[in-house]
Amino acid sequence: MEKVMTIEERIVERFLEKLKSDQLVPSEVVDSLRVLSKEGKLKDAQAILRAIGEGMKDHAKNTTP
């Protein structure tokens, strides 16, 4: 049986799709945000923005020679 998404979950999913399609953030960061979303850790805008910021910092550390 397929899980029914709440309106908040649908908004987050569409936002993540938009980030990925616009290539605003690296796909690795979007993928990690998706995992956090499925774990219920992206409940509000502040949590989403904080996770994006942390993901971008981690990505920069991992890609800087």
Image (spheres, rainbow, N blue to C red):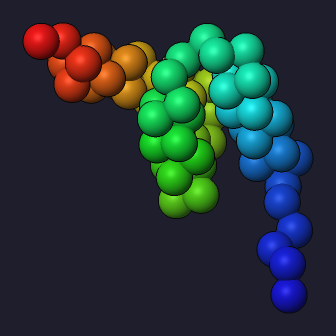
Q: Residue at point 81% right, 35% down?
A: 14
Residue 47 makes an appearance in the image: no
Residue 45 lies left or right of residue 35; in this view the side is: right
- From this view, report whether residue 27 is shown above or below residue 24: below
- Between 30 and 49, the one lying in front of the other is 30
Q: Quadrant of residue 3?
A: bottom right
- From this view, report whether residue 4 is shown above or below residue 14: below
- From this view, report whether residue 4 is shown above or below residue 25: below
Residue 22 lies left or right of residue 33; in this view the side is: right
Which image quarter is the N terminus in?
A: bottom right
Q: Residue at point 67% right, 27% down?
A: 20
Q: Position of residue 39 (x, y in %)?
A: 52, 59
- Between 36 and 47, the one lying in front of the other is 36
Q: Position of residue 57 (x, y in %)?
A: 29, 17
Q: Quadrant of residue 16?
A: top right
Residue 12 lies left or right of residue 2; in this view the side is: left
Which image quarter is the C terminus in?
A: top left
Residue 13 makes an appearance in the image: yes
